Amino acid sequence: MARLYSNLKFLRYAGHIEALRHREVVAPVHVRIKPMNHCNHSCWYCAYRVDNLQLGDGIDLKDQIPAAKMHEIVDDVIAMGVQAVTFSGGGEPLLYKPLPQMVERLGRAGVRVASLTNGSNLRGAVAEAFAQWGTWIRVSTDAWDDESFARSRGIALGQFTRLLDNIRAFTARGSKCVLGVSFIIGHDNAEHVYEVCRLMKDAGVDHVKLSGAVVANDRDANNDYHRRVAATVTEQIRLAQGLSDDKFTIVNHYHELEELFDKTYTTCPFLLFLTVIGADCSVYACQDKAYTASGLLGSIRDRSFREFWFSEENRRRIFSLDPSRACLHHCISHGKNLAINEVLALDPDHACFV
């Protein structure tokens, strides 16, 4: 099975590496769009809903991108040559009514399309759009039955059964769109990792990605939390990995978070590869800094995304953001930044001695 996750995908984009060397701005490879901040779930670990986490300190839960603005953004993305768009939260993107049409427009133009979702609305027109035009969908969960799902998300009983029904119906389409599940591990579900992986394999998903819940901005607090269940989780993951075959994979991202908090570099090169457009019509440095003042690149409410992205204002902001000061929190792009910075630091006279 071809590999879906890697910190080295940037190596395919030599033009972006050269742009970084000269402090120039080129179109991002990947744009993450948060179409709305409303969500029908309230997950206990959601960084946009939990007061003690970094994300979301400036979020307005009523915000959503107006349909006309979304059409403009999609036109810009296509014209700029952006290669991939992921719809995510903020809120639950599959509740955004214009989404099926946006997915089709992007797909017809050759832009790869994906979405993160809680899966509650993975049906009807939006499921059809992704089945036909999507590259991947990843459903996030932390539950193993109706009771645990209701308890962790503040929703009615029966929704986990409904989620499984949606997943089975989508996989039964025989679509090329990869359907994965992100299982978020905490104290309550540590003993259920294998059980959930088995359940999702039986439902027909392509893979389950295992990750630890981020419970605080502080590295040590996160690691202390997970060490209490680490032995149990390790054994559960060992059992789950035995489920892997040519049609199903376990992607193990469960580990201590130390390296995701401490930053020694003073620029963030990954800003040139991936950017985020929020439901407030603002552009942010990344998903880990969305809806924060320190992550704000600028507003596109009264100008186009294309105009803003290639502006001198944006260029200055991209190359002045200092992760060693502004990003002392969980950073999903940290490993990629380390790799890109190593490439940028190579002495050209010695780089040929591979």
Image (spheres, helix red, strand yellow):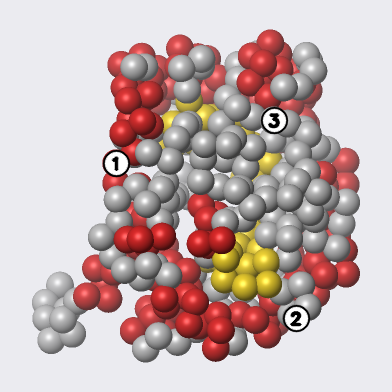
Density class for disc 1 (Cα within 10 Å; few <14, some 14-19, many ≥20) is few
Residue positioned 73% across, 58% down in the render: 279
Q: Is residue 348 above or below residue 335?
A: below
Q: Which mark is residue 14?
A: none
Q: Which residue is mark 3?
A: 42
Residue positioned 57% across, 56% down in the render: 292
Q: Which residue is mark 2?
A: 303
Q: Are marks 1 and 3 in contact (CB under 8 Å)?
A: no
First of labels 2, 1 by sequence position: 1
Q: Position of residue 165 (x, y in %)?
A: 77, 24
Horizontally, residue 118 falls left or right of residue 97, namely: left
Which residue is at the front of the view, 139 or 58? 58
Kindly identify the amino acid type of the residue bearing the numbered disc 3.
Answer: Ser
Which secondary structure lies at badge 3?
A: loop
Q: Is residue 301 above or below residue 190?
A: below
Which residue is at the front of the view, 226 or 180? 226
Q: Position of residue 173 (x, y in %)?
A: 76, 39
Q: Which residue is mark 1?
A: 258
Q: What distance separates the C-alpha of mark 3 from that of mark 2?
A: 33 Å
Residue positioned 69% across, 77% down in the render: 305
Q: Is residue 64 above or below residue 316?
A: above
Q: What distance separates the C-alpha of mark 1 from that of mark 3?
A: 27 Å
Quadrant, the C terminus: bottom left
Q: What distance separates the C-alpha of mark 2 from that of mark 1?
A: 39 Å
Residue positioned 67% across, 66% down in the render: 282
- The answer to whether any part of residue 261 appears in the image is yes
First of labels 3, 2 by sequence position: 3
